[in-house]
Amino acid sequence: MDRAQLLAPLTPSPGGAEQVGVEVECGLLDPATGIGARYSGPGGVRAVLEAVLRHWGGEPEQDGDCLTGVRLPDGSTVTLEHGGQIEYSSTPGPGVGKTMDDVRAALARLADLAAGFDLALVPGGNLPFGRLADVEWVPMSRGALMRQYFADLGPAGARAPHVMALSLSTQATLDFLDPADFTRKLRMQTAVAPVVSALLVNSPLHEGRPCGLLSHRSWAWLRMDPRRAGLLPPGLRPDVGAGDVVDWALGIPLIHYRTRDGRHHRAPEGSFAELLRHGLDDAPRRWAAHLDQLWTDTRVRRTLELRGADGPPHPHLAALPALWTGLAYHRESCDAAWELTGRHSAAEHRAARAELPVRGLDTRLGDTPVRPLAAELLRLARAGLDARVAAGLEPPHVPGLLDPLDEIVATGRTFASQTLARWDGELRRDPARYVALHRI
């Protein structure tokens, strides 16, 4: 592969626009026990997917004989994660308002359909009930390869099964328009990522009880091959470009690849650069697959996918894409957010990531408390959304989507701490009450 081929998957489409895509991962939970549905059986996740295909139309996505998703007629998708979590991915829309209208309508339809199988659709930061040992893995051919890869890493990959089977998130996908815009957005997103993750901690329950963490999900991600997850090291450079991301990605191993017969295979050992030096069949396709196997807080391809934070509770799903859109799609807010956070080193970022699962908003980024940083980022994001409303790019209600996050900063009560208080209070430590409160 030459340099142009390596850069091609990180190049925006000509004539692109700043659109907003949203992905919401949910559990399909038993309303009485809160335990996630199995893949197989008449009331399983596969049956729900078959119902989506039957009632909504679209094209099935298969892994061998395994139904893993549905591409809907409008281009959105309903797909499965490895432990049976179900994800709705929107088509890109012109703004947060339009996209979230579509997302909420689709999730409401999906929740109604799941209810017909006596299952509750519950978003958030993780599946809080059930044990890893009881998970029926979705029979994707790449799943077993991934689990073996992480097992071979020892402690550095020890929590990968929990991430694969039990984690949830809400993600936003944003655009960049040219190399300068790429630099501006990626460096800002990288610099503010630990602040956003600390603000949105929302996975304090694990296996049916408080686990001593505010974000079990963020804690587990630290133990899922940190080379390819969390901090994107070149993203902290003031002049970061797509070439820097390529150089970094070349140093990471490929986990698996798919041949044209649809089968997945474990990749040989060594970095992707080493595989290229020794000769690699179908290299461009395997390079694109490699980029999909990198799970940094911002995943870079033709778009910028913001994936580091826990998912919010369902009434507040729109807060996350609203925050990222307000910061990224308003140049003054984007530059100011970088100036606010861009001085911190990679070591300080890693220290904050290690601290935030336990401390949430009490985390420090270097010598700076996260809570006032979060307050200023929310002010900048609101200014960005106000500017988009004034320009006719968003409906007037969109800046108000940030209100739940402003309340968190004002009170110090994160979604996680609110859940813990309710768990010992009104929920009476009852999974059924938890599901009734959090289901869509």
Image: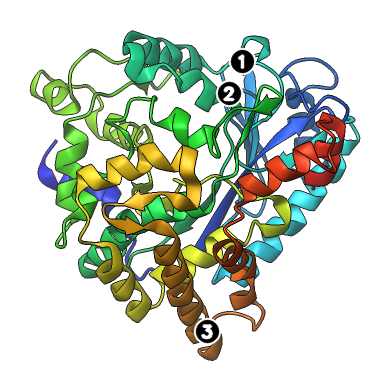
Side of 244 relative to 426 (left or right): left
Looking at the image, tell me whether mark 2 or mark 1 is earlier in sequence order: 1
Circle 3: residue type: Asp
* Horizontal and vertical percent position of residue 398: 62, 75
- Local secondary structure at mark 1: helix
* Horizontal and vertical percent position of residue 86: 66, 35
In the displayed orientation, state which residue is furthest to the left.
277
Q: Note whether 347 is above or below 49 in the view shown.
A: below
Neighbour tally class for label 1: few under 14, some 14-19, many 20 plus, Cα within 10 Å: some
Q: Are marks 1 and 3 in contact (CB under 8 Å)?
A: no
Q: Note whether 369 is above or below 148 in the view shown.
A: below
Q: Note whether 179 is above or below 36 in the view shown.
A: below
Q: Give 210 or 141, whichever is nearer the viewer.
A: 210
**Residue named by callout 2:** 165
Residue 386's label in the rendered image is 3
- Residue name at image x 19 percent, y 50 percent: 345
Marks 2 and 1 sit apart, C-alpha to C-alpha, by: 7 Å
Circle 1: residue type: Leu
Q: Are marks 2 and 1 in contact (CB under 8 Å)?
A: yes
Circle 2: residue type: Ala
**Residue named by callout 1:** 132
Q: Are marks 3 and 2 in contact (CB under 8 Å)?
A: no
- Residue name at image x 42 percent, y 13 percent: 145
- Local secondary structure at mark 2: helix
